[in-house]
Amino acid sequence: MAEKRDYYEVLGLGKDASEDEIKKSYRKLARQYHPDVNKAEDAEEKFKEVKEAYDVLSDDQKRAAYDRFGHVDPNQGFGGGAGGADFGGFGDIFDMFFGGGGGRRDPNAPQRGNDLQYTMTIEFKEAVFGKETDIQIPRTESCDTCHGNGAKPGTHPETCGVCHGSGQQEVVQNTPFGRIVNRRACTNCSGTGKVIKERCTNCHGSGKVKKQRKIHVKIPAGVDEGAQIRLSGEGEAGLRGGPAGDLYIVIRVKSHEFFERDGDDIYCEYPLTFAQAALGDEIEIPTLTEKVKLKIPAGTQTGTYFRLKGKGVPRLRGYGQGDQHVKVTVVTPTKLTDEQKDLLREFSGLQGETPQEHHESIFDRMKKAFRGE
């Protein structure tokens, strides 16, 4: 398996990166490698790598643990986890001398079900305004025929006659150090403490079956790329009466042909003619909900930004909305009639200076400013 890259390297950041820098880098890379936009073979893998790095570095506790331990999971100790040393052979020695270490675990105790993850791709405006939809989730559920105990209806699991319900067997070994009692999972009941003599014909004794479950999902307004929505109890069924796991819905957002998003703000670019920029004008700008009028002052330069307050994305956790920022770009005409060319030459002559002279006059003013004149 390929070695994991450093999470800071994945996001192109230094270890002193701020929370905002991490968020901005993630959004940029997520858009770059989004499988709906980037059709390269490795785009999806890179998208997952970026998502994994962001999940760790955006969480203060996870980031602190990563900065200290790297990709090694400190909770696994010496268990041979990611990057950890493998001392698996010592476990058998400790079992042999100390009877299996810690206290016994009840084999019949309730066990929580597994969590599930579902990736949902939505449109740009659906992320802005939210939506409600139904999804189909394949998951394991308790068998309706045997009510999850795995036994044929009318019968019940019986206590194992070998381990007497403990789920463990004691194996006696004679060693140079004396007589040692070693505890292992019972081979007769596989450590469950129960034996099913007549299995349920529907689930074949497992107590669980695979089903397609329809779930109604509410996507809140303002959700962004990579967000996770947790649906409690919608994961896989638990064992022996344990609670079900949770369902995590990971959001992917399609790009928009006109708008770009950065947090709660919206950005767009609008073309202006030379005449509009020079003389000023009033134009109509599309927003997320409607068209609004925007006044362009005379002498506007290309690349100027105008802000439309409150025309951005609804804040996911809070009140109000972000803003929309409009960047105007002066478009130079590529095809001119002879009359238009004559008019431009006349305009250039009336202006009284060439672009080079104008540039030099600006440079002269900068020199004076540095001299303090």
Image (cartoon, rainbow, N blue to C red):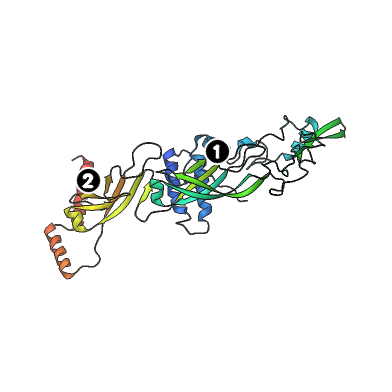
Q: Which residue does the numbered mark 2 point to in the structure image?
A: 367
Q: Earlier in the sequence, mark 1 or mark 2?
A: 1
* Residue 56 appearing in the image: yes
Q: Nearer the viewer, residue 334 or 218?
A: 218
Q: Callout 2: helix, strand or loop?
A: helix
308 sits to left or right of 276: right
Q: Nearer the viewer, residue 85 or 150?
A: 150
Q: CA distance from mark 1 to mark 2?
A: 51 Å
Q: Is residue 296 above or below residue 162?
A: below
Q: Which residue does the numbered mark 1 point to in the structure image?
A: 66
152 sits to left or right of 284: right
Q: Callout 1: helix, strand or loop?
A: helix
Which quadrant holds residue 348?
bottom left
Residue shown at 16% from the left, 54% from the top: 279
Query: Callout 2, which amino acid?
Result: Lys
- Residue 362 in percent (x, y) is at 20, 50
368 sits to left or right of 51: left
Query: Callout 1, which amino acid?
Result: Tyr
Kindly indicate whether the residue at mark 2 contacts the one at mark 1 (C-beta within 8 angstroms).
Answer: no
- Residue 54 in percent (x, y) is at 49, 43
- Residue 311 in percent (x, y) is at 31, 45
Farthest residue to the bottom: give it: 338
Farthest residue to the front: give it: 154
Q: Nearer the viewer, residue 257 or 1?
A: 257
- Crowd around label 2: few <14 · some 14–19 · many ≥20 (10 Å): few
- Residue 66 in percent (x, y) is at 55, 38
- Crowd around label 1: few <14 · some 14–19 · many ≥20 (10 Å): some
